[in-house]
Image (spheres, rainbow, N blue to C red):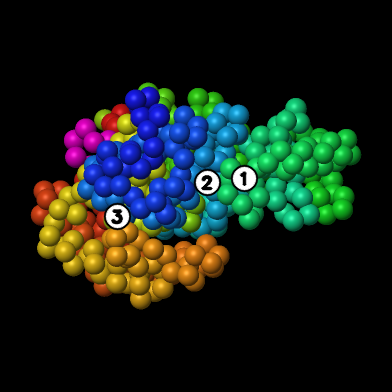
C-alpha cells in the first residue's frame, strides 16, 4: 500500500472505482496528510467498495467527513496505541433479542453470557444484563481504567493507575478533536482532585467532587448489579463457568489476522456445548451490522450463520467497508454478498432508485445533476440525530415493504443458502473457507 502514499484521494478513487469525485467532495480529504493507520482505512474501504460493485457516485459529504475527521480519532494511533473504549447505549439491542430468541439454556444451572471487549462506559453489557435478568452476565475488557474524571459538562477522561491520561470524550466533538488545551485541562483537574481521593481496593469505588468536577476510582464497580460483574482481563486469564453465549463485537477488527484468529480460537474455548459465539461489527448506533454466529459441538466451533442488516446495501456512512486491518473476512464476505445482490437485476433495478426516491421524500438527500448525493439544507444544518432518525424510519419502511425478503431471494438466485434470521437480518450459510473454523 506504500505505492499509494503520495497519491491524492481523488486519484485513488478513480484508480479503484473508475470515476473521479467532484471537487466539493474530494477537496475535503487530504489523503497524504493522514496517519499511516488512517490511510489504510481509506485504501481498504476503496478495495471493498470495488469488491461490492459500489460505484463512486455513492460517496457523499458524510462519508468524507467520517474518513477525514472522525475515523482517525477511533484508531489506536490517536491514543498511544490503546483501543479507544467507544460505545453507546442500545448498540446491541438486536443481538440481545437474537440470544433471547435462539437460546434455550438447560435449567440445570443459571445460563452464562460473556461480553468480551465491552468498552467504557459499559452500557451495552448493562443493556444485556437487563434483557437477560435470569442469566449471569460478565463484562470483560483488558482496558478498564483506574480513574474516570467527569468535568462540569459531563465530558469525561480516563486515567491509568499512574495518573496518565489515556482517553477522553467530548460529547459535542468528533473523536480526533482533542487539542492540547483539553488535555491540559483534564490533567490539571486530575492533579487537583486525585490527592483527595481514597481508593480502598479493586472491588469498590470511591469518589471525590469539587465545583461540579468528579473523579472516581474503580468506576467500573458502580455499574455492577445482581446478575452483572465486570473483570479486567485478557482472554488467556479468564476463568468462568462454560458460557452459553459469548459476544465479541467491534473488537477483533483492531487486530491483525493471526492475532484475530488466535483470539477467536481462545474465545471458543469459553463456550459450553451447543454454545453460541456472536462476533462482528456495527456502528455505535447499531446500524450497518455484520456478524458471524459460531456454534460449538464435539468437533469444535464452526460458523453456522453470517448476517447483515439491510442498510448495508445503500449506506450513507462508511460502515459496510470499515476495516482496521487487512483480511477482514466478514467485511470481505459482506462485499461479495452485496455484489451478488447488486448484480440481480430483478431486485436491484427496483430497489436502487426506490432508495433514492425515499431519501428525497424523507428530506435527507437527493442526486445532483452530476449523479452524486447532495444532502438537503435541513440535513446539513440540523443535528446528526435528524439524519439518523430519518434514515432509521426509511429503512424500517423498506423492511416493512419486503425488501429484506427481496434481497434474500436475490442471494438465493445467486446460489447462496439464504434466509431471514430471528431479528430480521439477511443471513446466509457461510461458504466454505469464507470464515474461520476451530
The stretch in magenta equals: 430-435
Say which residue appears at 46% left-offset and 40% top-offset.
Answer: 30
Return the residue at label 2: 69
Q: Nearer the viewer, residue 133 or 6?
A: 6
Return the residue at label 3: 57
The image shows residue 214, relative to residue 83, as above or below, that is below
User: How much space separates mark 1 and mark 2, taking CA atoms?
Assistant: 8 Å
Say which residue appears at 32% left-offset and 72% top-offset.
Answer: 358
Residue 198 highlighted magenta (yes or no): no
Return the residue at label 1: 177
User: How much space separates mark 3 and mark 1, taking CA atoms?
Assistant: 29 Å
Could you say where residue 264 lies in the image, as x and y percent from the top left?
39, 31
User: How much space separates mark 3 and mark 2, taking CA atoms?
Assistant: 21 Å
Q: Which of 98 and 436 is in front in this view?
A: 436
Which secondary structure class fits the magenta region best? Answer: loop
Could you say where residue 335 lies in the image, as x and y percent from the top left?
26, 45
Amino acid at each position: 500500500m506504500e505505492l499509494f502514499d503520495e497519491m491524492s484521494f481523488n486519484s485513488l478513487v478513480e484508480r479503484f472505482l473508475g470515476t473521479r469525485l467532484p471537487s466539493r467532495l474530494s477537496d475535503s480529504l487530504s489523503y497524504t496528510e493522514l496517519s499511516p493507520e488512517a490511510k489504510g482505512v481509506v485504501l481498504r474501504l476503496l478495495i471493498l467498495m470495488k469488491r461490492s460493485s459500489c460505484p463512486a457516485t455513492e460517496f457523499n459529504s458524510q462519508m468524507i467527513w467520517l474518513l477525514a475527521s472522525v475515523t482517525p480519532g477511533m484508531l489506536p494511533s490517536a491514543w498511544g496505541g490503546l483501543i479507544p473504549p467507544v460505545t453507546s447505549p442500545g448498540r446491541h439491542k438486536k443481538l440481545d433479542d437474537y440470544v433471547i430468541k435462539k437460546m434455550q439454556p438447560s435449567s440445570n444451572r443459571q445460563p452464562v453470557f460473556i461480553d468480551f471487549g465491552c468498552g467504557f462506559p459499559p452500557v451495552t453489557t448493562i443493556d444485556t444484563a437487563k434483557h437477560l435478568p435470569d442469566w449471569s452476565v460478565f463484562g470483560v475488557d483488558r482496558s478498564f481504567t483506574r480513574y474516570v474524571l467527569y468535568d462540569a459538562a459531563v465530558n469525561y477522561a480516563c486515567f491509568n493507575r499512574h495518573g496518565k491520561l489515556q482517553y477522553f470524550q467530548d460529547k459535542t466533538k468528533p473523536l480526533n478533536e482533542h487539542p492540547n488545551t483539553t488535555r491540559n485541562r483534564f490533567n490539571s483537574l486530575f492533579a487537583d482532585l486525585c490527592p483527595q481521593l481514597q481508593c480502598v481496593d479493586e472491588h469498590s469505588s470511591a469518589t471525590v467532587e469539587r465545583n461540579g468536577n468528579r473523579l472516581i476510582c474503580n468506576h467500573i464497580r458502580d455499574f455492577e448489579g445482581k446478575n452483572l460483574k465486570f473483570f479486567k482481563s485478557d482472554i488467556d486469564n479468564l476463568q468462568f463457568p462454560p458460557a452459553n453465549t459469548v459476544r465479541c463485537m467491534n473488537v477483533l477488527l483492531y487486530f491483525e489476522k493471526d492475532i484475530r484468529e488466535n483470539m477467536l480460537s481462545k474465545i471458543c474455548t469459553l463456550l459450553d456445548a451447543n454454545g453460541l459465539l456472536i462476533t462482528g461489527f456495527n456502528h455505535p448506533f447499531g446500524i450497518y451490522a455484520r456478524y458471524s454466529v459460531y456454534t460449538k459441538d464435539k468437533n469444535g466451533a464452526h460458523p453456522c450463520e453470517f448476517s447483515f442488516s439491510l442498510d448495508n446495501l445503500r449506506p450513507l456512512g462508511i460502515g459496510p467497508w470499515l476495516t482496521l486491518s487487512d483480511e477482514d473476512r466478514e467485511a470481505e464476505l459482506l462485499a461479495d454478498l452485496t455484489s451478488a445482490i447488486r448484480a440481480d437485476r430483478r431486485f436491484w433495478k427496483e430497489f436502487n432508485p426506490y432508495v433514492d426516491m425515499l431519501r428525497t421524500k424523507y428530506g435527507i438527500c437527493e442526486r445532483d445533476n452530476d449523479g452524486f448525493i447532495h444532502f438537503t439544507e435541513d440535513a446539513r444544518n440540523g443535528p446528526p440525530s435528524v439524519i439518523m432518525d430519518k434514515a432509521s424510519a426509511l429503512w424500517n419502511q423498506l423492511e416493512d415493504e419486503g425488501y429484506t425478503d427481496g434481497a434474500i431471494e436475490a442471494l438465493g438466485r445467486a446460489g447462496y443458502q439464504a434466509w431471514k434470521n430471528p431479528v430480521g437480518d439477511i443471513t446466509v450459510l457461510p461458504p466454505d473457507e469464507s470464515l474461520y473454523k476451530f
